[in-house]
Amino acid sequence: MERLRAALRSRTLLVVGVAVSIAVPAFTLPRLPHLTLWPLLLGLLPWVVGKYLLCPLRWRVLTDADLSRRWHLRAYAESELLGLLTPGHAGADVWRVTRLRRTGMATGDAVLSVGADRLVGALGLAVFVAFAGTALPTSMLLVALAVGVVATLGALVVHRLRPSLLPRRALPRPRQLAQGLVLSAGYQLSIAALLVGSLAATGHSLSPLAVLGAFGASQVAGVLPGPQGASPRDGALVVALAALGVPWEAAAGAVAIKAALAWLPALALGGVSLLLARRALRASGVAVVPATS
């Protein structure tokens, strides 16, 4: 975790992440014979609501802590920007755990909070993929099973060697889980809207359920890290869309557009929040750790 925190402060990582995210759409989009902007805006608006409002509220519902909605909105927006800069979006979870620990929460409880949010989000996606009638790849089920086994074994080892790292708070109650799943369902709909809008911008269309099924089927590649817009998950999504009949260039263009659009709200919301927090620290006289290369 210390290495990930150091990576989040690395100027080199920042430059590489931004460069790759700009290079992918810059290389792909000019090769598209057709590109319309208004479907992008129609798809982006609900996705911003889903990502930066519904997801933080889901996290708050599953976190047993006396923290305001505003705190969760800001912390989540900051984590999304840092996640875009790190392979596999790992920086997002590290930052959320760090922010919770700064409030005085124990490490185990902070990890439980973020882990529960991730789990409910994955369950929401699985429900939508099943509803879309898309068969989950066997590899995805095997990965999910392997993660569960590893997590169980890890918890047993930690319980024996470092019990202080385990959560002290109770697990989320059924009502909290139900609320989280409802919020997750809203977020999945917003993902479908963004993908449908990105496809429509290239002059092609698929049903929202088919698009969401392709997105869900591509998630198995998320176990392999990669930069935003050029990760194995993005490549798998291109393949899934092409399998549904979308031309390869249009599928690659839609995924590149989706990846590029994610930077706009992340920079506007997460970037501004981080700058304000940094300024507040300087104003209070607290030393700010400089970025390293």
Image (cartoon, grey):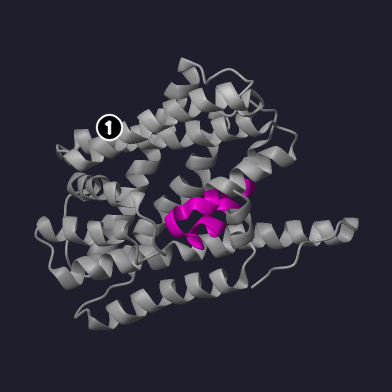
Residue topped by disc 1? 127
Residue range corresponding to the magenta coloring: 73-92
Question: Toward which corner of the image does residue 258 lie, by quadrant?
Answer: bottom left
Q: In this view, does 12 lie to the left or right of 135?
A: right
Asked whether 229 falls inside the magenta stretch, the response is no
Asked whether 85 falls inside the magenta stretch, the response is yes
Asked whether 134 or 290 is in front, the reply is 290
Q: Position of residue 288 (x, y in %)?
A: 79, 61
Question: The C terminus lies in which quarter of the figure?
Answer: bottom right
Q: Examine the rendered structure and indicate whether residue 79 appears above or below residue 183.
A: below
Q: Is residue 274 left or right of residue 89?
A: right
Q: Position of residue 238 (x, y in %)?
A: 22, 61
Q: Examine the rendered structure and indicate whether residue 161 appears above or below residue 36.
A: above
Q: Which residue lies furthest to the front in this view?
A: 161
Task: Indicate the secondary structure of the residue bearing disc 1.
Answer: helix
Q: Position of residue 183 (x, y in %)?
A: 43, 34
- Main structural element of the magenta stretch: helix, strand or loop? helix
Q: Examine the rendered structure and indicate whether residue 80 appears above or below residue 177.
A: below
Q: Is residue 136 left or right of residue 125?
A: left
Q: Position of residue 111 (x, y in %)?
A: 57, 35
Q: The disc labelled 1 sits on which kind of residue?
A: Val
Q: What residue is drawn where x is 43% and y is 31%?
A: 151
Q: What residue is drawn where x is 65% and y is 34%?
A: 107
Q: Which residue lies furthest to the bottom in this view?
A: 30
Q: What residue is drawn where x is 33% and y is 43%?
A: 189
Q: Is residue 182 visible?
A: no
Asked whether 30 or 200 is in front, the reply is 30
